[in-house]
Image (cartoon, helix red, strand yellow):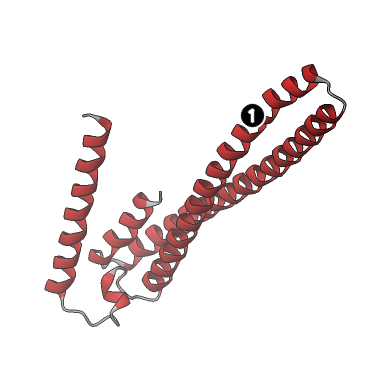
Amino acid sequence: MFEPLRDGLRGISARLDPDERRRITHTMREALVHARLGVESLARAVAETAARLAAERTELETVRRRQGLAAQINDEDTVAIAERFALLHEERVVMLESKQMVQQQEHAMAEREYASMAAELRDLMAGVTPGPASDAGGDTPEPARRRTRAEKEADADDRLAALKRRMGK
């Protein structure tokens, strides 16, 4: 979701010009603000889906209650209509539950990515090279850092190829 910003953070480590570093970190701070807005938008979407799900469950309970009352007085037409509406509301509840689960997962993933990027930006502003070296304590030799990046790029290429295969391209 935030890969362009993350790539920008990692790309700075090769640049040593302090003026350029300040300019880029300023731009990245702005991008991080926009990323935060995206995370907040996902949180609002989760809340909206939760509200819709609660309303749909209430409607389903109402329809089932009316169906039961109609059955008690032997009103076959109302029972049949209530059955149709109950099926419709049950289907909506299942769909909204799935949607809510996916939105919650997406929001959690975005939160983790945002936190990781914010930590990388803090490290960069403190003069620590972002990426695997900062996780290992900062004194990782240059060849190890390149190897890790190469592995990440290879992994990204593999994931892109798999996505293309799934999309039929």
Q: Position of residue 150 (x, y in %)?
A: 15, 60
Please identify the residue farthest to the left as the structure is shown: 143
Position of residue 72 in the picture relative to residue 56 (left or right): right
In this rendering, the answer to whether 95 lies above or below 137 is above
The residue closer to the viewer here, 117 or 124, is 117
Q: Position of residue 45 (x, y in %)?
A: 60, 44
Q: What residue appears at the point 12 percent right and 72 percent down from the top-left corner?
A: 143
Q: Position of residue 14 (x, y in %)?
A: 22, 64
Position of residue 26 in the picture relative to residue 163 (left or right): right
Residue under numbered circle 1 = 87
Graded by Cα atoms within 10 Å as few (under 14), some (14 to 19) or many (20 or more), the crowding at tag 1 reads some
The residue closer to the viewer here, 25 or 115, is 115
In this rendering, the answer to whether 142 lies above or below 107 is below
Please state which amino acid type lies under the numbered disc 1: Leu
Q: Position of residue 28 (x, y in %)?
A: 42, 57
Position of residue 49 in the picture relative to residue 82 (left or right): left
Q: What residue appears at the point 76 percent right and 39 percent down from the top-left corner?
A: 61
Position of residue 24 in the picture relative to residue 143 (left or right): right
Q: What residue appears at the point 20 percent right and 79 percent down from the top-left corner?
A: 140
Q: What residue appears at the point 43 percent right and 55 percent down from the top-left corner?
A: 27
Q: Quadrant of the C terminus?
A: top left
The residue closer to the viewer here, 38 or 164, is 164
